[in-house]
Image (cartoon, rainbow, N blue to C red):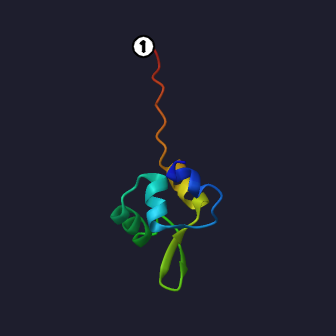
Amino acid sequence: MAHTDKLAGKLLLNVNEAVAATGIGRSSLYELMRVGELPVVKIFSRTYFRPSDLEAFVERRLVRPVERKAA
């Protein structure tokens, strides 16, 4: 079973799971948290991500091709 299959249906992902799910590096995730680009859930000293927040982050950065008009 693929690692991402194990993540399906989880309410919260820890940092390692978020890295595995997104392919974004650990330090980049922490930087995105620091600048407020990626919301987190803090439980005591632990940091978690909601899968929906990770998906929304990716969608906000989706680059769509620009259609060029024929000359």
**Between residues 6 and 41, which one lies in front from this camera angle?**
6
Residue shown at the point (43%, 59%) measured from the top left: 19
**Between residues 24 and 16, which one lies in front from this camera angle?**
16
Residue shown at the point (55%, 48%) measured from the top left: 1
Horizontal and vertical percent position of residue 49 = 54, 67
Quadrant in the picture for residue 26: bottom left
Question: Callout 1: helix, strand or loop?
Answer: loop
Horizontal and vertical percent position of residue 61 = 47, 48
Residue that lies at the very extreme toward the left in this rendered image: 27
**Between residues 40 and 62, which one lies in front from this camera angle?**
40
Residue shown at the point (46%, 14%) measured from the top left: 70
Quadrant in the picture for residue 6: bottom right
Amino acid type, residue under disc 1 in the picture: Ala
Horizontal and vertical percent position of residue 17 = 48, 62
Residue that lies at the very extreme toward the top in this rendered image: 71
**Between residues 57 and 13, which one lies in front from this camera angle?**
13
Residue that lies at the very extreme toward the front in this rendered image: 1
Asked if 3 appears above or below 45 in the picture, the reply is above
Q: Which residue is mark 1?
A: 71
Badge 1: how crowded within 10 Å, few (<14), some, or many (20+)? few
- For the C terminus, give its image quadrant: top left
Horizontal and vertical percent position of residue 29 = 40, 64
Residue shown at the point (63%, 62%) measured from the top left: 10
